[in-house]
Amino acid sequence: MSLDLQKRWAERPPGMRDVYPQQAKHRRRLETRLLRFFEDRGFEQVSCGLLEYVDTLLRSRSAGEAEDWFRLFDATGRTVALRPEMTPSIARMAAPLLAAGTAEIRWCYAERVYRRTTDPATLSWASGKAAESTQVGVEWIGRTGCTADAELLALCQQAADAVGLADWQMVVGHASFAPAFLASLGLAQAHVEQVMQCLARGDYVAARWQLRAGGVAEDALSWLAALNPLQAEAVPEVVRPYLADSVVAGCWEELVSLARVLAEQGLTDHLSFDLTLARDLTYYTGIVLELFAPGVGAPVALGGRYDDLLGQFGAPAPAIGFTFEAERLLTALTEGAWLHEPEGEEREC
């Protein structure tokens, strides 16, 4: 066999990763540890198929998001996709139970997800651009309010501690605050959407350009960054008039109430608020969170509140959840005690 032919057979599609025995063992142990942690706190494990109809995934989402999905046709000609994340699948599964009268659902999962990328040169788990990854997360359906939000944030923090993650930092924002705030400044809706897309990519230069193009002072991002719900009494004078807008005021009150509960529960030591935080998923309606760790160029955990998504499946209900990206988490973890548990301590999940 020629060397060139051998190399060709060894090639992998962009973004796919081979996992050899030691790393596979560590990933499995991490999944087991997280699932056990969630189950011990009342979340039941569920699983679902790898493929979803694109129509299902597009509930409460923009059509442009489908550009990052692996899509194909099933035997009936309908377009399906490899699931890019778990929340829409969980919503689809939960809707019939809610419609039948179930008041509250607490589920956890450990599943593979897939995203298409056009930048093969930067593909890696640590950068957050791998086409295949493992999500281990929870979804809590049927509860609303700052107390529930704080409980989920606490669960995420406690799970990070439980697997031995050191020096993590949680960042919390609100999906509806920045768009409403920018609109209150007089920014047209088209420019608001462009700014939010730039913020989701972390491109603050482009975001400021969009503000200028829309006739709004680029200092608006600085005003957002200066707002800290943990210090609600210290709102800059230049911002106060815009907090009078009814939508902005409602979001701000949610954040201040959440900050108060977090402070009372001692959950703010490694937590900060960032009202420029934006996610590239359009179904979020309330708080959003990201958890960062040294050595990883993307969040190791992320999530938020999505109170409108279940209604798209015929069963309106408030919901919140988060997921750990297992491979990113593995990258951040050192060879701690959790990697060396006695084999007897593991159980099947």
Image (tube, grey):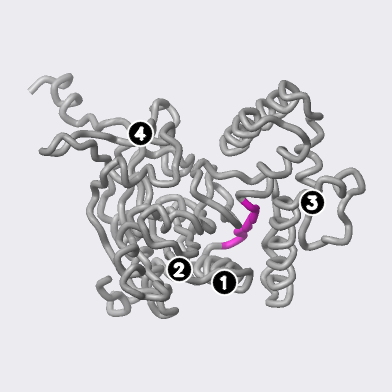
328 magenta-colored: no
Q: Where, quadrant-wise, is the C terminus in this rendering? A: bottom left
Q: Characterize the local packing of mark 3: few (<14), some (14-19) or many (20 or more) Cα atoms within 10 angstroms.
A: some
Q: Which of 307 and 74 is in front in this view?
A: 307
Sooner in the amino-acid sequence: mark 3 or mark 1: 1
Labelled disc at residue 148: 1
Mark carried by residue 140: 2
**Mark 2 Cα shell of 10 Å, populated few (<14), some (14-19), many (≥20):** many
Q: How many neighbours does mark 4 have within 10 angstroms: few (below 14), some (14-19), or many (20 or more)?
A: many
Residue under the image location 64 percent in, 53 percent down: 174
Local secondary structure at mark 4: loop
Are the two marked residues, 4 and 2, in contact with CB atoms closer than 8 angstroms? no
Type of amino acid at the residue the image marks with label 2: Trp
Q: What stretch is highlighted in magenta?
A: 166-174
Q: Which amino acid type is shown beneath numbered disc 4?
A: Arg
Dominant secondary structure of the residues highlighted in magenta in the image: strand
Q: Which of marks 2 and 1 is nearer the N terminus?
A: 2
Sequence-first disc among 2 and 3: 2
Q: In which quarter of the image is residue 188?
A: top right
Residue 270 located left or right of residue 148: right
Q: How dense is the environment of label 1, judged by Cα within 10 Å: few (below 14), some, or many (20 and up)?
A: some
Residue under numbered circle 3: 227
